[in-house]
């Protein structure tokens, strides 16, 4: 399992999702907040404003952002780390064995990541939630909620297994992927979900014996796509088998039996 060690200049700040922090030097302060980084999408909506009106707008913006993260199934809080005395060091990691990747944002293109991929980012990177629509979400599971990163700076993401980088433009403009393998993609890539063969014989064969479910994610356009080789579902199944649970027959669990 990989980890990332970040060196902070005096006054520089990074933030992470709660639970991704590992260690820090004593000259780095840690603060937990419900809001995203200053200057983000929430701050832009709140407006400047001073006095009671400005405080009210800020409180409403913070509550809206926390509500979006709760709807996405994420932690309500961010943790912020700032170096206060010379150069400081902070360590972060993901929650599953696999790879980590630093994405460099230059302000021209946003990045979208599945909801468990985000680890940490510079304070100059804005965090947001992108909703893909009810139909896509119901079909693709992970597709309903994506995390969106804009601005300038570095974003660190993590995934399970190994990463592979693809561009759909190199494969005729479209690729089809297991919904659990999508980690992140650039703005300009269109994400969707399609049914495999519908509710016909071959579709049911894919779902029951192939273990792929009835849907695949589709990624179209010209831009970077990052996929992971291990899905959370396959990891969970492997752990259950290793612990002797969920005895399954050739149907992959559809007609599983419990043996006394």
Image (spheres, grey):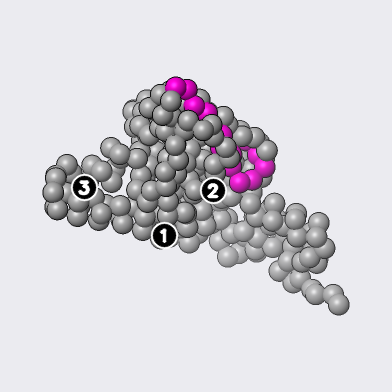
- Of residue 259 and residue 33, the one placed in the foreground of this image is 33
Quick check: is 89 in the magenta stretch?
A: yes
Query: In the rendered image, which quarter contains the N terminus?
Result: top right
From the image, tell me which residue sits under label 3.
46
Estimate the spatial distance between the alpha carbons at disc 3 and disc 2, rounded to whole Å: 28 Å
Which span is picked out in magenta? Answer: 86-102
User: Dot 1: few (<14), some (14–19), or many (≥20) neighbours within 10 Å?
Assistant: few
Residue at the disc numbered 1: 71
Q: Residue 225, can we see it?
A: no
The first of marks 1 and 2 along the sequence is 2
Q: Nearer the viewer, residue 1 or 22?
A: 22
The x, y position of residue 7, in whole percent, is 50, 25
Classed neighbour count for the residue bearing mark 2: other residues with Cα under 10 Å, few (<14), some (14–19), many (≥20): some
**Contact flag, marks 3 and 2 (Cβ < 8 Å):** no
Q: How many marks?
A: 3
**Residue 8, placed above or below residue 199:** above
For the residues marked 1 and 2, what is the alpha-carbon distance in whole angstroms? 18 Å
User: Which secondary structure, mark 1?
Assistant: helix
Query: What distance separates the C-alpha of mark 3 from that of mark 1?
Result: 21 Å
Residue 120 on image: x %, y %: 48, 38
Q: Residue at x 58, y 40 (%)?
A: 22
Say the numbered circle drawn on residue 19: 2
């Amino acid at each position: 399992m990989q980890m990332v060690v970040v060196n902070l200049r005096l006054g520089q700040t990074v933030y992470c999702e709660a639970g991704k922090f590992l260690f820090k030097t004593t000259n780095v302060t840690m603060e937990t907040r419900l809001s995203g980084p200053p200057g983000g999408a929430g701050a832009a909506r709140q407006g400047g404003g001073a006095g009671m009106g400005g405080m009210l707008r800020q409180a409403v913006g913070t509550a809206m952002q926390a509500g979006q993260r709760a709807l996405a199934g994420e932690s309500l809080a961010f943790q912020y780390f700032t170096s206060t005395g010379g150069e400081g060091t902070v360590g972060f990691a993901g929650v599953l064995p696999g790879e980590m990747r630093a994405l460099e944002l230059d302000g021209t293109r946003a990045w979208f990541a599945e909801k468990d991929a985000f680890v940490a980012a510079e304070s100059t990177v804005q965090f947001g939630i992108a909703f893909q629509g009810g139909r896509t979400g119901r079909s693709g599971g992970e597709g309903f909620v994506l995390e969106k990163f804009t601005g300038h700076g570095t974003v660190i993401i993590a995934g399970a297994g190994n990463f592979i980088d693809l561009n759909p433009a190199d494969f005729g403009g479209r690729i089809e992927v297991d919904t659990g393998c999508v980690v992140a993609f650039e703005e300009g890539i269109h994400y969707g979900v399609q049914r495999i063969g519908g509710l016909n014989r071959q579709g049911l064969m894919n779902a029951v014996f192939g273990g792929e479910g009835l849907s695949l994610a589709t990624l179209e356009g010209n831009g970077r796509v990052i996929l992971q080789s291990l899905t959370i579902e396959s990891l969970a199944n492997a752990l259950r088998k290793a612990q002797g649970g969920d005895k399954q027959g050739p149907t992959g669990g559809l007609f599983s039996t419990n043996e006394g």
